Amino acid sequence: MEGFIRFILSWPRAVIAIIAIVSVILGWELRTLQPEVKLRDMTPRDHVFAAIDDRLTADFGAGQTNLLAIGVTQGDVFTTATLAKIDRLTRAVAALPGVVPSSVLSLTSPNAKALRPEPDGVRVGPLVETVPDTPEGLQELRDTVAAHPMYRGYLVTADGRGAIVSADFAEPVAVEQITSALEAIAASERDPGTEILLGGQSPALAALQAETRGIAPLLALALVVIGLVHYEAFRTLQAVVLPLATAVLSVVWGLGLASLLGRPMTPWTALTTILVLSVAAGHAVQILKRYYECYAVLGDSRRAVQVSLERIGPVMVTAGFVAAAGFASLATFGVPAMRDFGLVAACGIVSALVIELTFIPAVRVLLPPPRRRELRREGEHTVLDPAIAWLTERVVQSPRGVLAVVLGAVLLVSSGIALVRVNTAFRSWFAADAPVIVSDREIRARFTGTSTMRVRVATGQEDGLLDPRVLHGIDALEQTFAAEPAVTATLSVTDYLRQMNRALSDGDPTADRIPDDRALVAQYLLLFGTDDLARVMTADHSTAAIHALARSDDVAWVSGLFARLRDVARETMPPGVTVEVGGGELAQALANNESTVHDKIENMVQVSGVIFLLSSLVFRSAVAGLLILAPLLCAVLVNVGVMGWAGSNLSFATASYTSMGVSLGADFAIYLLFRLREELQIQPMRDALRETMRTSGRAIFFVASAIAAGYATLLVSDFVLWRQLGAYVALIMATSALATLTVLPALVLIVRPRFLRAKEPVPRAQATSSETRATPGSPPR
């Protein structure tokens, strides 16, 4: 640190210029940073369901499913005017960029096939070849649709009052572009007698992107709130502006580095702006508090900058890299969005550390020294100081009693962990009155499900699907889907084969079955065109897909349904056939559920291991690592317990805040132990602890307040996910700080660890004189 401090003191203007140049360069990078939300980035890519979904996409083009639900106020949709609307909507959707052609389905889509008996066999053609304009033609269409039950829920509602246009889109196409285009198409056909609702994955993801853009006003509000916290900490505008300037620069650096690394702006990387803003501003409290403390003793501003950097610099480097390492450990998360969050947060923390150790002391050297009135106001805290003194005396007088009370409270609150429910369905992140949720809820209630599920059946050989045993197995799987009340529509190759068999039997209801003869199945398939069955079967007849739409996105229900589907596959499929249950949106949500608990535990172990290792190395004691982890464990147990009592769902998104709290909370314990070890050089344990709590304890309070207040601004957001994260981060900051100021000193008094013992205690007067002997501007010790 000596050479570093010498450079800062000797070249403050050069340091400020370097910071300014880097800030301009990284700020320029922000021009390319745009919100980008992809469904695949919110699911664990190493999960088997992700691989199944990728294979379904390769085989059938399955992507983000979107729906236009058309409802009429009078009669049914089987009118010339409404069918013409559906036809125009279908053509417009089919012409959109990124659409999977074989996935476009509606009453008038060429992909919707009808099997019509004729004297010499069956004719396979579009359900609607031309929009009928006579009562007889419209009635014939009603009868034809009724004869094809697989289209109920996919193309038309059971009561005929609603119709559906559905299509899948390849994920590389921007979700906001898809959503805007679909909304424009729907708006062009709405009239007083026709309602058109938009639903599916793309509108929900586009809403996530829109919420991501809403971070800007929240960031401005956080800046104001943190400024008020700093004013309370220092009672001077000068000490408020400097930390906030540091915080803003840290945000620019963090996001600029993210842009350079090609990381997109997601709802989670957007949150790093408030994280970095809060942490940078909060940690600036530590260095400025120490500066004011040194200046009060030394009476020389330049020397105070030097001594405060000597004392606080190593602590800040240690705490900063521990926090950054904790966030960087999120790179092991299977969810790409969490990996990006951890990477961007780590970059932001390191940026804040660099700026705090350079920009703040450089500016502080050039500023005039604090006036006497400013020093007096900074040191007066009529409410906080007595509260910390009271808490300190409780700990000093009865460390075991304080420890027992705290642990009892932790155990009581943490009993709520048993009530925690894991649910990662991303629709739960929105408020119930959010437009995208209102539309989605209406479609589910009146038309069909909007959540997709898919099953892939691979025989491994050409024409393997001609085997009636395989087809009966597919039919059994589809019937398992259809038996669920929450499933509104299913589609597979067996629907077409059943319909073909019945059509060739003059509509005999008893013929609604799959032929048991392989040759007959082959003949039936020859009657279909090359692309007629592209949605449900590959061209070489080797692989099939089963599609289902559901009204529910309850992940526990999905898990049970998938288990039943696997059981059915084992019972019905012949040897050599691979049945992969786990495609679609709900499979991705289930993958998140299955990964959240495992990955969260694994990540918490990793974060704790990083903190333990680095802390043990810095203090040269494993006991130090354990002491630092103790208050963090208390904070995590309390917060997850509160989550259970409050009924909040645990998802990969809400699970991330525990890592955040542990990484940031470790700073408090590190600062406290460093200061305590310093004080033990000049006075006995109990007096050293009192002085540590008075100085570092006060700073910890303001750091925690800055971070908690910054995140608490998310509570005004209309985005439920951000409100949850804001509340829980504020809570874990408060509990981490409180546990650090109670559990940690109590354990120190009980254990009396060796790494804190001074080899040669130095009287305070001598220590003070050693700081004041140097003349202003002299080289650091």
Image (cartoon, helix red, strand yellow):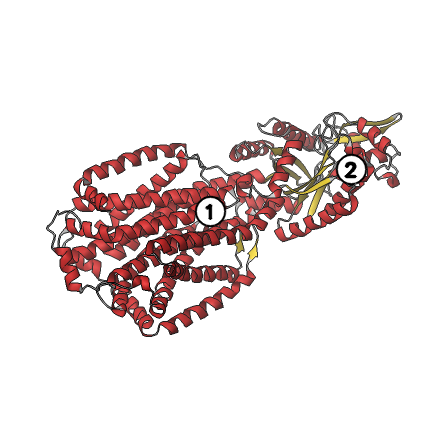
Q: Amino acid at mark 2?
A: Thr
Give residue 227's position: percent from left, percent from top: 29, 51
Q: Amino acid at mark 1?
A: Leu
Q: Residue at coordinates 85% horizontally, 36% vertically from top-left?
A: 515
Where residue 636 is drawn, which disc sits there? none
Residue 396 in sight here = yes
* Mark 1 secondary-structure assignment: helix
Identify which residue, 706 or 427, lies in the foreground: 706
Where residue 330 is drawn, which disc sits there? 1
Q: Residue at coordinates 87% horizontally, 36% vertically from top-left?
A: 507
Give residue 484's position: percent from left, percent from top: 72, 49
Q: Relative to residue 245, is residue 112 drawn left or right?
A: right
Q: Relative to residue 123, is residue 25 drawn left or right?
A: left
Where residue 494 is drawn, which disc sits there? 2
Residue 708 in sight here = no
Give residue 775's position: percent from left, percent from top: 10, 51
- Mark 1, residues whose alpha carbon is within 10 Å: few (<14), some, or many (≥20)? many
Quarter location, residue 549: top right
User: Does the CB distance between marks 2 and 1 fall below 8 Å?
Assistant: no
State the CA–CA distance, disc 2 to disc 1.
45 Å
Identify which residue, 375 or 333, lies in the foreground: 333
Question: Looking at the image, which residue sits at the far front?
Answer: 759
Q: Residue at coordinates 34% horizontally, 35% vertically from top-left?
A: 26
Give residue 718's position: percent from left, percent from top: 47, 49
Q: Relative to residue 150, is residue 407 drawn left or right?
A: left
